[in-house]
């Protein structure tokens, strides 16, 4: 197909409305078109040097592309990020939304805000909150959530309490059209991270408990979705942009449809 035919076909637009885009998680396999060795290359030694404006973001190639496209399509009224790392990703969200001309309430939660880059902390577009997401009700109260505009984009990158976090937002504000993304459900990304940890100073990036929770995150999500198979559907468009589950977030980009 020539570039003229590609432009005329507008597949980048028509594919968004294909009938099989959103599926129940039971229709998805826990696998990827990239094998474990491939993931080790993609998320090994350079995993923690990706930045935005010089601020650590730890975003992969697939994730950067996927989020940029999702932000434009969703035009979120609210973004809630659980797990801020150094603040690079949430600053990138704010910048991209500004380019799109979208006014969005942005909240970023972390258990230790001292780790946030000062350039991120000074960004007036972002509300940083320090708190423990295993007690999410104390961090983001139902009253606060009730006041936030929709659609929502809720992103969990805490590896803390997958089912509990899903249940809390389910009961406190998630509406039809909102997105819930559970990050790092790809079990293959945990091996290169922990191996890199050993090759470096042996500093503990992740505790053994966190690694175990990370490896179990997709199973925990599946179990939580069992009683809600038609309420939250998997968005295969973003998961499979570069091949089946070629992302850190296997089968865990969810849209609430009921």
Image (tube, grey):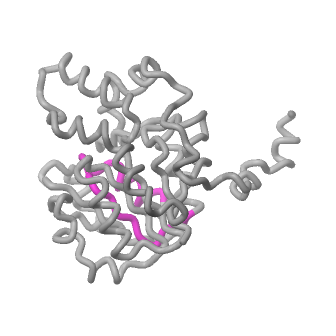
Tally of numbered tags:
0
Identify the residue at image location x=28%, y=51%: 87
In the picture provided, is 158 more to the left or to the right than 155? left
User: Where is residue 171 drawn, in percent x and y?
Assistant: 35, 74
Image position of 202 with respect to 163: above or below: above
User: Where is residue 164 drawn, in percent x and y?
Assistant: 27, 60
> Of residues 238 and 10, which is closer to you in this image?
238
User: Where is residue 116 drawn, in percent x and y?
Assistant: 20, 51
> Of residues 69 and 173, which is closer to you in this image?
173
Q: Quadrant of residue 215?
A: top left
User: Where is residue 83 drawn, in percent x and y?
Assistant: 26, 52
In the image, residue 114 lies in the stretch drawn in magenta: no
Image position of 222 with respect to 30: above or below: below
> Of residues 80 and 51, which is closer to you in this image?
80
In the image, residue 80 lies in the stretch drawn in magenta: yes
> Of residues 201 and 198, which is closer to you in this image?
198
In the picture, which quadrant includes the N terminus?
top right
Q: Residue furthest front?
A: 227
In the picture provided, is 208 more to the left or to the right than 69? left
Identify the residue at image location x=40%, y=36%: 186
Does the image show residue 23? yes
In the picture, which quadrant includes the C terminus?
bottom right
Image position of 167 with respect to 143: above or below: above
Does the image show residue 125? no
Identify the residue at image location x=29%, y=61%: 165
Identify the residue at image location x=15%, y=62%: 131
Segment colored magenta: 74-96
């Amino acid at each position: 197909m020539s570039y003229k035919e590609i432009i005329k076909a507008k597949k980048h637009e028509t594919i968004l409305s294909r009938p099989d885009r959103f599926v129940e998680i039971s229709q998805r396999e826990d696998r990827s078109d990239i094998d474990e060795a491939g993931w080790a290359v993609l998320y090994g030694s350079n995993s923690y040097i990706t930045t935005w404006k010089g601020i650590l973001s730890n975003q992969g190639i697939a994730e950067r592309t996927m989020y940029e496209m999702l932000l434009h399509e969703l035009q979120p009224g609210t973004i809630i990020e659980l797990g801020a790392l150094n603040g690079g990703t949430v600053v990138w969200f704010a910048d991209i939304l500004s380019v799109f001309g979208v006014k969005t309430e942005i909240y970023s939660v972390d258990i230790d805000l001292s780790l946030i880059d000062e350039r991120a902390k000074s960004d007036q577009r972002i509300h940083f909150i320090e708190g423990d997401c295993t007690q999410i009700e104390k961090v983001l109260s139902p009253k606060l959530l009730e006041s936030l505009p929709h659609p929502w984009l809720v992103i969990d990158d805490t590896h803390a309490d997958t089912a509990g976090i899903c249940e809390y937002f389910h009961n406190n504000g998630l509406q039809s059209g909102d997105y819930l993304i559970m990050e790092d459900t790809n079990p293959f990304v945990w091996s290169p991270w922990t191996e890199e940890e050993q090759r470096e100073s042996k500093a503990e990036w992740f505790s053994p408990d966190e690694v175990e929770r990370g490896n179990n995150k997709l199973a925990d999500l599946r179990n939580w979705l069992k009683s809600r198979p038609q309420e939250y559907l998997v968005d295969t468009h973003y998961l499979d942009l570069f091949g089946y589950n070629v992302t850190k977030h296997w089968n865990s980009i969810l849209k609430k449809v009921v």
